[in-house]
Image (cartoon, rainbow, N blue to C red):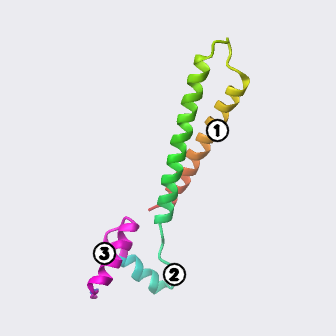
Amino acid sequence: MRFSLSDEEHALVRAAAAGERLAVGAYAAQAVLAAARGSALPQYALLREALATVMHAAQQVRRIGVNLNQAVAASNAGEPPLQLQRYAEVAARATSNLDALAQEVRRCLP
């Protein structure tokens, strides 16, 4: 199958393909098939952006956990204050939840 696009149209398709991290031909094929089926073209850019945000949040939570662990280790008392332990537990739980969410988003991507 062949078709022609103006320079402006080609630039639009190229930009859309780049946004989906697809080759122009692959993007065009998906768009044509979606139109033929009367369905919407899958949009993975939002999922990729969500994945990046979740991964960044997980990294930040890990940093908080590291800082909490250092604070506990530096504590002069035999045991760290109960509040620090709770913060560490919350950070660990949040990290686990974010990692699970990132895996779920990853499974939705091609």
Nearer to the camera, 86 or 26:
86
| Image coordinates for residue 84, horizontal then vertical, percent | 67, 26
Q: Between residue 103 and residue 85, name the one nearer to us.
A: 85
* Residue that appears at 50% across and 54% down: 51
Q: In x, y percent, where is residue 3?
A: 28, 88
- Which residue corresponds to mark 2? 39
Q: How crowded is mark 2: few (under 14 residues within 10 Å), some or many (20 or more)?
A: few
Residue under the point 56% across and 23% down: 70
Residue type at mark 1: give it. Answer: Arg
Alpha-carbon span between mark 1 and mark 3: 43 Å
Dominant secondary-structure state across the stretch colored magenta: helix
- Point out which mark residue 25 bears: 3
Split into 4 quadrants, where in the image is the C terminus?
bottom left
The magenta segment is: 3-27
Q: Which mark is residue 93?
A: 1
Q: In this view, does 76 lie above or below 33?
A: above
Q: Earlier in the sequence, mark 3 or mark 2?
A: 3
At which x and y percent is residue 94?
62, 41
| Marks 1 and 3, the one that precedes in the sequence | 3
Which residue is pictured at 71% across the width and 21% down the height?
A: 81
Tag shown at residue 35: none
